[in-house]
Image (spheres, rainbow, N blue to C red):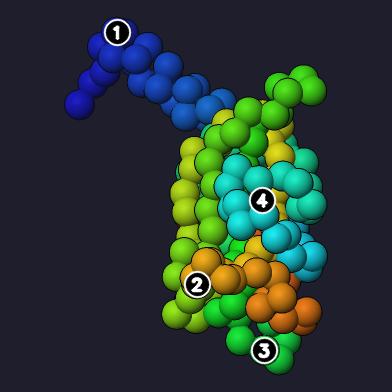
């Protein structure tokens, strides 16, 4: 098989493109952003929530879908009386624009973590707020029900990660 000049030029262009094209791999994109909060907030509000929460500012390392994990962890007591509330904001100068929230949805039945998903853009600055709150089991629920050894954990990482991340 002989290549005509036009085919040879096309083949050289493709080879050059493949050689000089930046190689993107998921390994280049792994990022783990976590924050914890151990001071129960008695407002009952979950997201968007920033008051009395732990604030973590970060820049997204790539444009992809990220997982947000909201988890309540207790050393010796049950986690069913507390919930983890995670709020994500986009930072634009001094302004924070609410993007999404995630919280441990079924805390009342002892399901103490939950995953949510959001698309983020590389190079953009975001703010993750993590708050410990009481699980709204009934109208009488309050932070006195949430044990002192419990904490809210909020982590954000690219959703393709099979291991997630921990604080």
Mark 4 residue element? loop
Tell whether 75 sits left or right of 115: right
Residue at numbered disc 3: 77
The residue sitting at 59% across, 33% down in the picture is: 98
State the CA–CA distance, disc 1 to disc 3: 73 Å
The answer to whether residue 5 is above or below residue 134 is: above
State the CA–CA distance, disc 4 to disc 1: 45 Å
The residue sitting at 73% across, 86% down in the picture is: 75
**How dense is the environment of label 2, judged by Cα within 10 Å: few (below 14), some, or many (20 and up)?**
some
Mark 1 residue element? helix
Q: Earlier in the sequence, mark 1 or mark 3?
A: 1
State the CA–CA distance, disc 4 to disc 2: 35 Å
The residue sitting at 53% across, 41% down in the picture is: 100
Towards the viewer: 149 or 59: 149
Residue at numbered disc 4: 31
Q: Earlier in the sequence, mark 2 or mark 3?
A: 3
Residue at numbered disc 2: 137
Tell whether 143 sits left or right of 47: right
| Residue extending farthest bottom | 76
Residue 124 in picture, x, y percent from top left: 66, 29
Q: Which mark is residue 6?
A: 1
- Residues under numbered marks 2 and 1 in contact, where contact means CB atoms less than 8 Å apart: no
The answer to whether residue 5 is above or below residue 101 is: above
State the CA–CA distance, disc 2 to disc 3: 17 Å
Q: Nearer the viewer, mark 4 or mark 2?
A: 2
**How dense is the environment of label 3, judged by Cα within 10 Å: few (below 14), some, or many (20 and up)?**
few
Mark 3 residue element? loop
Mark 2 residue element? loop
| Residue extending farthest top | 6
| Residue extending farthest front | 140
Q: Quadrant of residue 152?
A: bottom right
């Amino acid at each position: 098989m002989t290549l005509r000049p036009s085919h040879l030029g096309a083949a050289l262009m493709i080879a050059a493109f493949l050689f000089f094209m930046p190689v993107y791999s998921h390994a280049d994109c792994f990022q783990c952003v976590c924050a914890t909060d151990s001071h129960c907030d008695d407002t009952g509000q979950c997201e968007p929530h920033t008051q009395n929460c732990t604030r973590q500012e970060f820049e997204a390392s790539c444009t992809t879908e990220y997982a947000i994990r909201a988890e309540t962890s207790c050393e010796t007591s049950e986690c069913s009386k507390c919930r983890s509330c995670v709020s994500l904001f986009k930072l634009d100068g001094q302004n924070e624009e609410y993007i999404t929230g995630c919280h441990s949805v079924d805390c009342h039945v002892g399901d103490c973590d939950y995953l949510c998903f959001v698309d983020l853009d590389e190079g953009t600055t975001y703010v993750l707020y993590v708050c410990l709150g009481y699980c709204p089991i009934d109208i009488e629920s309050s932070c006195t029900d949430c044990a002192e050894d419990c904490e809210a954990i909020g982590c954000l990482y690219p959703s393709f990660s099979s291991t997630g991340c921990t604080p």
